[in-house]
Amino acid sequence: MAVLVLAEHDQGVLAAATARVVAAVAALGPVDVLVVAADAAAISLEASRIAGVSKVLAASGLAHASSDALTNLLAGVAEGYTHIVAAAAAVGRDVIPRLAARLDLMPVTDIVAIHGPARFDRPIYAGNAIETVSSSQSRQLLTVRASAFRPAAGGGTAPIENIAMEASTRQAFVGEARTQSELPELSTAQIVVGGGVSFGSAEAFALVEALARTIGAAVGATRAAVDAGYAPNDWQVGQTGKIIAPDLYIAIGISGALQHLAGIQGAKKIIAINSDPDAPIMKIADIALIGDLFTVVPALTAELEKLGLKR
Amino acid sequence: MKILVAVKRVVDHNVRIRVRADGTGVETENVRMSMNPFCRHAVEAAVRLVEAGAATEVVVVSVGPRQANDVILTALAMGAHRGILLEAEGRVETLAVAKLLAAVVAEERPDLVLLGKQSVDDDSNHVGQMLAGLLDWPQATFASEIKVVGSTLEVTREVDFGRATVAVALPAIVTADLRLNEPRNAGLPMVMKARQKPLAIRPAGALGVDLTPRLMVEQVAPPAERATGRQVANVAELAQVLAAEIAELEAL
């Protein structure tokens, strides 16, 4: 049994999700990490330091994570592995099913618990049910919800092996629009502050960001807030956006629509601020404050600043 | 351009689902069913390409029980031209669905296949990518915008860092995200007209695809319930609670 993990990275930096995926699958066998990037050297060095990694495979020459080029590369190295695993994020979701069809395998995706080499839990119906599936296939293709697992430690010294890749793709890169933010990465942040559509404008939504900055949190938003243009699309948390599992989630002006709750079910503690005591979010919150967000949020930010909570 | 759109009949997304007490699955008897929301965006995108003069025909296909005719009729009412139901009872895995669709593509020879990015029942997010893999076509998943530029499509995708735009030559696979468009609600005249449009029903088993599931669903369980919380009286108290929580996290 041997496991290959496809590394998540962005702008030349290894994503925190990778160490979580490595920890999730470590019990399945020796773990190799594959880094595919324009220049994989620096990211591979970071990956080699994850505890429990046996070997890092570095493939340079692919600037954008094109599903067809990644599929070709993975299909070429698949032979040596019983498990091929990616984080359940945009790249993994794009590539693993394509690879699965190519290898005639049924993948298991969005895994939140691993019970054995071929037995997994995954949420269905927006997290309103958990399905336990087992596979009798000889090889497992998986995506794992990184936020459901604790990261592997650092301090590893795995060897790095360069491998050749055919980087040709039929998915030509045209351009990209990035959300600039110095706040922590949403999908793996310890603390997340989420805002809903009741903020009423992008300007007012800045109240969420100010609170987040004060406590070193990432910012999330509901689908309605993103649709209304108050927050960028990559901040969306829910069934169709990012699935998060922070230690602390602070939901402000969020009623708790099913599809949003699907994205926060893994949160260890939920604090809700809402003017409506009957909002669904208030029923699942560990701590709730009933109040008007336009007065509560600035007051809370000021109070926390007074307490010297700058992280 | 000829477009094939795949649609799925699922438990309506507004229904609060109930897990069967015996752990065999989610109750779907006597539950309101409708077209998967992401599929509606795919149908809408296809119909708009026809309205813009970029496409000439939209064929809708679904895999499922006889009642899945309903969602095909919905798509026909929205403006699709004809429908195909590949009738299958029970659980059909995404890989088998992709193989069935590949067989339909071989017959219909569309230039573009549009699908929803995932269905809200099993939340798999597989079929579009699998179909692209089987056909060896380029794919553009999680689309929030589609532009036709000559014989290529420029597709804006919703990804982890924001948006990325890719160009794919036809034939191609595109999967729809929710911000792609506002799907229309077809009026009664369109619903009546839809009933006159051709709808072929074929047994899924006749397409030469092995429909036997590869995975065994051992159990379906409701998620763990959250403990009841408490209310705080004012901002000062909330700030104290938050400060204590954060101090605890810092200590870890």
Image: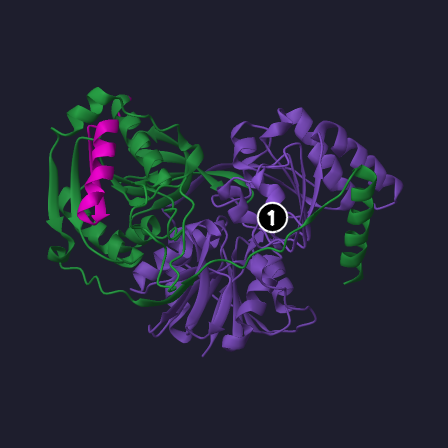
Chain colours: A purple, B green
Q: In the rendered view, does A242 fall on the left or right side of B23?
A: right
* Residue B209, percent from left and from top: 17, 60
Which residue shows up at 48% across the image and 49% down it?
A90
Q: Secondary structure at mark 1?
A: helix
Q: Quadrant of the N terminus of chain B?
A: top left
Q: Quadrant of residue B216?
A: bottom left
Q: In the rendered view, does B252 fall on the left or right side of A150?
A: right
Residue A109 in view (yes/no) = yes
Q: Is residue B55 part of the magenta span, yes or no?
A: yes
Q: Quadrant of residue B208?
A: bottom left
Circle 1: is it few (<14), some (14-19), or many (20+) Cα within 10 Å?
many
Q: Amino acid at mark 1?
A: Ile
Which residue shows up at 63% across the image and 64% down it?
A151
The stretch in magenta equals B52-79
Viewer-proximal residue among A253 and B107: A253
Say if B139 sits above or below B94 in the image.
Answer: above
Chain ID, mark 1:
A
Q: In the rendered view, does A284 fall on the left or right side of B81?
A: right
